[in-house]
């Protein structure tokens, strides 16, 4: 599951970078034309990197995967696979209210799908497992979902406030989350004793 997910995320990032077009002019002023798309690409790349990083650490902390987990993972990958579309639309439309609303909605759906995958893994491993203890109350995950929901609500009124709300979870998650690493260490220690 981990290798498949890594491959899908690599393809998503590749599709996204292929949307970057070289400006027709050779001077720096030509870069202004692609600046909105380039910024949306950077933002999406950061989000995909955060998902990959956390997904990788999460899977290191689990011991079994069943059909429910596989489907929850596919659900997450489905929403992540739409990131290149939303990124391109937001950049090409120069952050129109509608495109920002769609982008924020997609990020909310990705966040919900990730939460579903986490909860499915907790059910699979038990509420007393090292994985469940490491996950805890998932404060950053809940704050992220709230920011995305607020970004959707603000997008049609104040587009740049909405973009700011979208950036908050990215900044929050840029600080590495060591919860799953601690769970892996705890499980190893338990097996060795």
Image (tube, grey):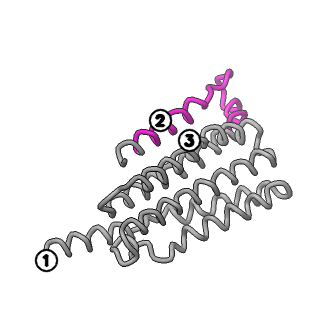
Q: Check disc 2 and report its element: helix, strand or loop.
A: helix
Residue 105 left/right relative to 66: right
Sort mark 1 into few (<14), some (14-19) or many (20+) by Cα contacts within 10 Å: few
Q: SS class of the residue under badge 1?
A: loop
Q: CA distance from mark 3 to mark 2?
A: 9 Å
180 lies left or right of 187: right
- Above or below, comparing residue 10 to residue 177 in the picture: above
Query: How far across and down, in percent of the image, does residue 191 sit?
Result: 17, 71
Labels 1 & 2 near each other (Cβ < 8 A): no
Q: Which residue was labeled with disc 3?
A: 81
Q: Residue at x 67, y 61 (%)?
A: 148
* Magenta region includes residue 156: no
Residue toward you, 68 or 61: 68
What residue does disc 1 label?
Answer: 193
Q: Residue at x 26, y 74 (%)?
A: 186
Q: Residue furthest front?
A: 67
Between 156 and 62, the one nearer to me in the picture: 62
Eyeballing the image, is 132 above or below 50? below
Cα–Cα gap, marks 3 and 1: 42 Å
Segment tinted magenta in the rendering: 6-35
> Residue at position x 43%, y 58% from top?
54
Question: Mark 3 falls on what kind of element?
Answer: helix
Q: Position of residue 185 (x, y in %)?
A: 26, 70
């Amino acid at each position: 599951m981990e290798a498949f997910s890594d491959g899908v995320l690599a393809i998503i990032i590749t599709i996204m970078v292929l949307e970057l077009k070289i400006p027709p002019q050779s001077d720096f002023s030509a870069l202004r034309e692609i600046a909105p798309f380039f910024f949306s690409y950077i933002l999406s790349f950061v989000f995909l990197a955060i998902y990959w990083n956390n997904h990788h650490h999460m899977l290191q902390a689990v011991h079994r995967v069943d059909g429910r987990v596989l489907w929850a993972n596919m659900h997450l990958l489905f929403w992540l696979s739409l990131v290149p579309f939303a990124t391109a639309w937001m950049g090409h439309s120069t952050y129109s209210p509608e495109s920002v609303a769609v982008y924020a909605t997609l990020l909310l759906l990705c966040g919900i799908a990730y939460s579903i995958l986490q909860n499915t893994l907790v059910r699979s491993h038990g509420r007393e497992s090292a994985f469940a203890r490491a996950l805890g109350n998932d404060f950053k995950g809940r704050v992220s979902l709230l920011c995305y929901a607020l970004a959707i609500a603000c997008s049609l009124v104040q587009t740049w406030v909405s973009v700011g709300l979208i950036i908050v979870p990215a900044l929050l998650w840029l600080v590495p989350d060591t919860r799953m690493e601690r769970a892996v260490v705890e499980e190893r220690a338990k097996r060795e004793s």
